[in-house]
Image (cartoon, rainbow, N blue to C red):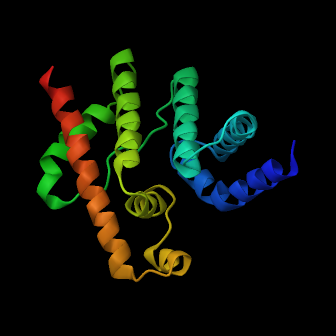
């Protein structure tokens, strides 16, 4: 493996490893499962990085992790995805409650699995539509559990700017996921 690709892999693991493991841990039943999934993600990353460049490494890693979690769910018939609704507020509680009932059902039918996968797919598509800075703030805060104080240190931006970016991201994601909700409940 060329040295620059090896150093890129090492840097990516340092940058995303801890938060990605936390993301996975919240969605599986055991730490051992989380570590196995993370190892699979890193293996896939090292394989892909040798053949093609990845434009948005963070989004790619979370998408692969989510796919691995879903695969594990299918194999063991466990409930692994425990929180699939993007930051709610009081004005949309009724819609989100209905959305949660669809996505978080204990039912393990092909239809519910399809809906869960569709939700994650649409979330990542909607994230890809955001301006880079809004997407990054949302991913850091919601998916990687990075606090706004930590983001201030990372970016040098003031906290109000970061909160505003996340707000715009959440508004966009709600709008896009509302479209998905409407499509799901209309059939």
Question: Residue 45, image x and y in percent?
Answer: 69, 40
Residue found at x 38% / y 81%: 159
Residue 159 or residue 6, whichever sits in front:
6
Question: Residue 127, image x and y in percent?
Answer: 38, 48
Compared with 60, 20 (above or below) is below
Compared with 80, 73 (above or below) is above
Relative horizontal placement of residue 62, taking residue 122 as reference (left or right):
right
Q: Is residue 83 at least partly visible in the picture?
A: no
Which residue is at the far top? 110
Compared with 160, 114 (above or below) is above
Q: Is residue 184 at least partly visible in the picture?
A: yes
Residue found at x 44% / y 75%: 148
Q: Is the N terminus in the top left, top right, bottom left or bottom right quadrant? A: top right
Question: Residue 136, image x and y in percent?
Answer: 46, 60
Question: Residue 63, image x and y in percent?
Answer: 52, 40
Residue 38 or residue 54, whichever sits in front:
54
Residue found at x 29% / y 71%: 164
Residue 12 or residue 31, whichever sits in front:
12
User: In the figure, residue 51 lies in which quadrant?
Assistant: top right
Compared with 147, 54 (above or below) is above
Q: Is the C terminus in the top left, top right, bottom left or bottom right quadrant? A: top left
Relative horizontal placement of residue 56, taking residue 10 as reference (left or right):
left
């Amino acid at each position: 493996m060329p040295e620059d690709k090896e150093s890129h892999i090492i840097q990516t693991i340092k940058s995303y490893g801890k938060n990605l493991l936390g993301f996975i841990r919240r969605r599986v039943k055991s730490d051992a499962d989380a570590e196995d999934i993370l190892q699979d993600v890193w293996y896939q990353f090292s394989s892909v990085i040798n053949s093609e460049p990845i434009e948005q490494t963070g989004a790619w890693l979370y998408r692969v992790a989510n796919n691995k979690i879903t695969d594990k769910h299918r194999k063991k018939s466990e409930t692994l995805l425990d929180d699939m609704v993007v930051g709610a507020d009081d004005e949309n509680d009724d819609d989100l409650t209905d959305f949660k009932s669809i996505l978080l059902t204990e039912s393990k039918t092909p239809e519910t699995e399809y809906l869960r996968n569709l939700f994650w797919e649409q979330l990542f598509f909607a994230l890809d539509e955001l301006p880079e800075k809004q997407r990054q703030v949302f991913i850091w805060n919601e998916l990687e559990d990075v606090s706004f104080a930590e983001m201030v240190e990372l970016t040098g931006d003031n906290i109000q700017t970061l909160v505003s970016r996340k707000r715009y991201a959440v508004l966009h994601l709600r709008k896009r996921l509302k479209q998905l909700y409407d499509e799901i409940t209309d059939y």
